C-alpha cells in the first residue's frame, strides 16, 4: 500500500479514501505548498466578467512616499469590498515577497480586482499598490499606464515628502485624475490642516477635495471608494474592437510557465483563443485567463477595460516582454507604445562564488529579470573572479533587494562588486573614433577608460535631487551637499517649518552613502528623491592600484580628481588588511598615471638571524642583517604577489567607508 501511495503521489493521482469528499492529491496537508501550485486556481467558481461593462470599471493606483500607508490603505479597501475576510492578520496583504515583509517596504507593484456596489450599481475596481522608494519609481510609472486615476496618500504627521512630489508629477504628466488622501489622522501629532495647506500650495488642489482617513483604524476609508467611482473616469475602449492587450508585468511559475499580467485596451480574450505576441511574433493558445483578487481567480473571458492575468504556455522567460502587445491570430493591430526602458543609474559586477554555479545563476537571473525588467544585464569576465555579468540598477536599495531576492527565491549566493556609475568620454583621437564608430563612448568598466591624451573631455552623470527637511537642519544639509560637489538650484519654504531644496548632484557622489548621511544629519526627518539630469563635463581620472609596481586591473577605479587621494588611501589600507604577508616586503600603491598618491607597506615575515649572537663584535650582527636584507631584496625582485580570491572579494565587495 505504501508503494502504491508513493506512486500515486508521484503522478498526482487521488489516494484511495473511504469518504466521497477525498481532496485532490496536491491539496493534502503533508505535501509541500509548491506541489499545490499547478492546481491552485482550479476548483474555484468562475466569475462572469461580462456583467461589468466599460462604464462600471475604474482602474486606479495608490501612490505615496515611503511608509505613508499605501499598503495599509490597500488592505482596508480589500476588506471593505469583501475581497479578503476581515482579520487582525491583514497586514501588507499585497506585499507577497519575503524581502517586502522583512524590510516593511513595497518592492513590486501588485494588482487586485475589487467588486463594489455603489448606489445600486456593481462596479469593478482594479487597484494597483505601488512602491514608495525612489529606486522603484519605474514600477510606479509602469503601473500608471494601466490606470485612469490615482489616490495620492500623504501622512498627516510628516506632510509632503520628496517622493510625494515626484509621484504627483508622474501622475500629473500622465493626465490622470488625482484624489488627495491624508492618512494617519489618528496619530497624536497629526496635523491634517497643515498638510491640506501644503497640498494646496504645492499641487494647486483645493483643501475641500482632501479626504482625511485613518487606514489603520478604517476611519473614512469607504469615502475613498465613493470618490474613486465619482472622480476617476472609466477606461476609453470598446469590446467591439479587435483584441489589444498590454503586458504590464509578468512572473515565472515552474509548472505553468510565464504568467503575464495584462490590461485590455480593446476586444475580449477567452480560453482556447489563438494569440500572437507583437514583440516575438510567436503564436500561443490561451490556457487560462482570470483576475487577481489578489490571488488568481479564473474567469471565462476578460473584456476591454479590465485588468487580469493570462497563461498561454510561454515556457521561455524571454517570451513575455513587459510592454509587449498581444492580439488575436490573423487580426493584427498597431502595437501599443509600451514603456520607456528604465535608465540604470548604478552598475555592479555579479559573479558566482563557484564557477560551477554559472549556468544555475544565469537561469536564476533570467527568471528574476523577467519579474524586474528595470535591471539591465551584460556579460562580463574578470581575471580574478571569472565569468559573470555587469548589472545595471536604478539605485543602491534596488541592488540590495535584487541580491536578497536571488538568495531567498533562487538560493544563489553571489559576489557583488563595488557599485559604479556610467561615465562618457568625447574622443579626439581619429584612430579611436574609427575603432568605436562614434566620437562619444559610455564607460561602465574602468578597464575601458581611454587615456586623457585621446579624449577632449570626460562627462559624468548628474541628477536633480529634491530634499524636503525641517528648517532647523538646513545648515547641516547645505554643508553636506557642498561637500558632495552639488550646485543649489532652488530653495522653497513649503510652510513655516518645512523647506524644499533642489540640488544638481554628480551621481557618483550620492550613490553609496549620501542617503544614510542625510538621515543621520536630520535625525531621520529629511527625505530625498532624485531624477536623471543628463551629463556634465568633469575632471575624471583612472586610479590604478599597484602591488610592488605591477598594476592590478581588477582594482582600478574611475574617480573625480578632488576625491582621488582619500579614496586611494582607503583602498590601500583595506588591501593591507586583506593581503596575506609574504617572506618579502609588499608595496601597495595608488597611482594616477605615473604619480603615486598613496602607499601602504606590508612588512615581510622575518627570521631573527641575530638570535645566536650573544655579545661579541657589532660587525658580526651587521653582517648577518645585511645578508638577510640582500636575500629579501632578491626575493622581492623574483617573487610574484598573487592576490588571493577571498582578498579580492573582501576589497571589491560593497562596504561602508570606514
Image (cartoon, rainbow, N blue to C red):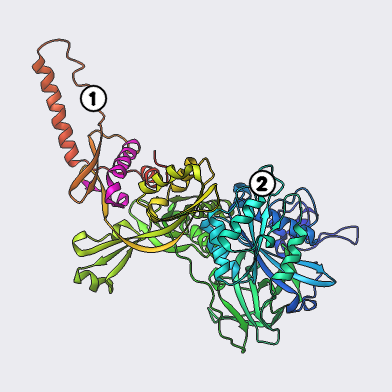
**Mark 1 nearby-residue class (10 Å; few <14, some 14–19, many ≥20):** few
Q: Is residue 324 visible?
A: yes
Q: Quadrant of residue 455?
A: bottom left
Please identify the quadrant where the N terminus is shown: bottom right
Badge 2 vs badge 1, beta-carbon distance below 8 Å: no
Residue 634 vertical position relative to residue 20 in the rendered view, above or below: above
Q: Nearer the viewer, residue 294 or 524?
A: 524
The magenta stretch spans which residues? 550-577
Q: Quadrant of residue 249?
A: bottom right
Residue 362 vertical position relative to residue 335 in the rendered view, above or below: above
Q: Nearer the viewer, residue 102 or 2?
A: 102
Tag shown at residue 32: none
Please identify the quadrant where the C terminus is shown: top left
Give the side of residue 113 with respect to residue 283, left or right. right
Report how far apart the C-alphas of labels 2 and 1 lie in the structure.
71 Å
Magenta segment: does it hold 239?
A: no
Q: Position of residue 125 (x, y in %)?
A: 73, 68
- Residue at (38% x, 57% y) in the render: 421
Q: Secondary structure at mark 1?
A: loop
Residue 215 vertical position relative to residue 571 in the rendered view, above or below: below
Q: Nearer the viewer, residue 196 or 410?
A: 196
Q: Which numbered disc, 2 or 1, marks the residue that appears first in the sequence?
A: 2
| Residue matched to label 2 | 190
| Residue matched to label 1 | 607
Q: Position of residue 624 (x, y in %)?
A: 13, 22
Q: Is residue 653 visible?
A: no
Residue at far right of view = 19
Amino acid at each position: 500500500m505504501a508503494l502504491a501511495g508513493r506512486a500515486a503521489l508521484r503522478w498526482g493521482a487521488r489516494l484511495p479514501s473511504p469518504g466521497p469528499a477525498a481532496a485532490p492529491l496536491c491539496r493534502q496537508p503533508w505535501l509541500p505548498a509548491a506541489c499545490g501550485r499547478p492546481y491552485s486556481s482550479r476548483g474555484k467558481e468562475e466569475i462572469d466578467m461580462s456583467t461589468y461593462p466599460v462604464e462600471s470599471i475604474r482602474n486606479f493606483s495608490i501612490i505615496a512616499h515611503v511608509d505613508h500607508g499605501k499598503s495599509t490603505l490597500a488592505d482596508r479597501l480589500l476588506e471593505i469590498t469583501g475581497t479578503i475576510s476581515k482579520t487582525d492578520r491583514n497586514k501588507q496583504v499585497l506585499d507577497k515577497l519575503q524581502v517586502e515583509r522583512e524590510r516593511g517596504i513595497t518592492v513590486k507593484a501588485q494588482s487586485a480586482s475589487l467588486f463594489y456596489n455603489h448606489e445600486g450599481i456593481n462596479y469593478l475596481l482594479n487597484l494597483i499598490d505601488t512602491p514608495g522608494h525612489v529606486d522603484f519609481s519605474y514600477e510606479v510609472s509602469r503601473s500608471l499606464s494601466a490606470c485612469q486615476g490615482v489616490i495620492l496618500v500623504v501622512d498627516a504627521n510628516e506632510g509632503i515628502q520628496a517622493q510625494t512630489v515626484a509621484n504627483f508629477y508622474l501622475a500629473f504628466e500622465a493626465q490622470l485624475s488625482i484624489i488627495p488622501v491624508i492618512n494617519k489622522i489618528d496619530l497624536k501629532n497629526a496635523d491634517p490642516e497643515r498638510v491640506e495647506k501644503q497640498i494646496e500650495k504645492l499641487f494647486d488642489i483645493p483643501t475641500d477635495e482632501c479626504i482625511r482617513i485613518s487606514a489603520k483604524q478604517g476611519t473614512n476609508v469607504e469615502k475613498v471608494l465613493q470618490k474613486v467611482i465619482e472622480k476617476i473616469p472609466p477606461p476609453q475602449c470598446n469590446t467591439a474592437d479587435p483584441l489589444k492587450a498590454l503586458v504590464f508585468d509578468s512572473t515565472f511559475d515552474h509548472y505553468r510557465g510565464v504568467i503575464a499580467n495584462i490590461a485590455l485596451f480593446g476586444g475580449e480574450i477567452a480560453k482556447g483563443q489563438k494569440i500572437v505576441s507583437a514583440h516575438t511574433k510567436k503564436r500561443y493558445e490561451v490556457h487560462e485567463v482570470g483576475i487577481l483578487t489578489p490571488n488568481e481567480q479564473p474567469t471565462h473571458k476578460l473584456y476591454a477595460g479590465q485588468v487580469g492575468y493570462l497563461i498561454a504556455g510561454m515556457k521561455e522567460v524571454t517570451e513575455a516582454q513587459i510592454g509587449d502587445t498581444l492580439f488575436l491570430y490573423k487580426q493584427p493591430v498597431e502595437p501599443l507604445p509600451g514603456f520607456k526602458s528604465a535608465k540604470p543609474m548604478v552598475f555592479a559586477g555579479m559573479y558566482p562564488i563557484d564557477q560551477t554555479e554559472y549556468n544555475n545563476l544565469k537561469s536564476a537571473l533570467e527568471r528574476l529579470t523577467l519579474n524586474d525588467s528595470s535591471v539591465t544585464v551584460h556579460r562580463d569576465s574578470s581575471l580574478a573572479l571569472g565569468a559573470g555579468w555587469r548589472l545595471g540598477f536604478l539605485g543602491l536599495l534596488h541592488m540590495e533587494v535584487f541580491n536578497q531576492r536571488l538568495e531567498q527565491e533562487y538560493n544563489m549566493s553571489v559576489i557583488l562588486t563595488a557599485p559604479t556609475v556610467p561615465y562618457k568620454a568625447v574622443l579626439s583621437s581619429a584612430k579611436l573614433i574609427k575603432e568605436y564608430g562614434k566620437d562619444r563612448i559610455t564607460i561602465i568598466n574602468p578597464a575601458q577608460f581611454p587615456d586623457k591624451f585621446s579624449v577632449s573631455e570626460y562627462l559624468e552623470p548628474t541628477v536633480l535631487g529634491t530634499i524636503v527637511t525641517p528648517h532647523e537642519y538646513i545648515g547641516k544639509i547645505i554643508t553636506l551637499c557642498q561637500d558632495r560637489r552639488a550646485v543649489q538650484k532652488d530653495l522653497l519654504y513649503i510652510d513655516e517649518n518645512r523647506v524644499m531644496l533642489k540640488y544638481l548632484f554628480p551621481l557618483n557622489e550620492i550613490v553609496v552613502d549620501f542617503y544614510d548621511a542625510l538621515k543621520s544629519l536630520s535625525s531621520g526627518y529629511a527625505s530625498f528623491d532624485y531624477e536623471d539630469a543628463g551629463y556634465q563635463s568633469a575632471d575624471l581620472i583612472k586610479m590604478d592600484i599597484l602591488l610592488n609596481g605591477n598594476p592590478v586591473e581588477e582594482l582600478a577605479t574611475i574617480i573625480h580628481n578632488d576625491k582621488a587621494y582619500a579614496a586611494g588611501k582607503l583602498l590601500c589600507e583595506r588591501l593591507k588588511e586583506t593581503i596575506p604577508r609574504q617572506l618579502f616586503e609588499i608595496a601597495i600603491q595608488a597611482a594616477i598615471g605615473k604619480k603615486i598618491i598613496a602607499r601602504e607597506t606590508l612588512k615581510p615575515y622575518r627570521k631573527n638571524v641575530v638570535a645566536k649572537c650573544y655579545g661579541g663584535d657589532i660587525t658580526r650582527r651587521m653582517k648577518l642583517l645585511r645578508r638577510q636584507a640582500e636575500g629579501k631584496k632578491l626575493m622581492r625582485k623574483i617573487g610574484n604577489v598573487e592576490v588571493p580570491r577571498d582578498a579580492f572579494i573582501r576589497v571589491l565587495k560593497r562596504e561602508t567607508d570606514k
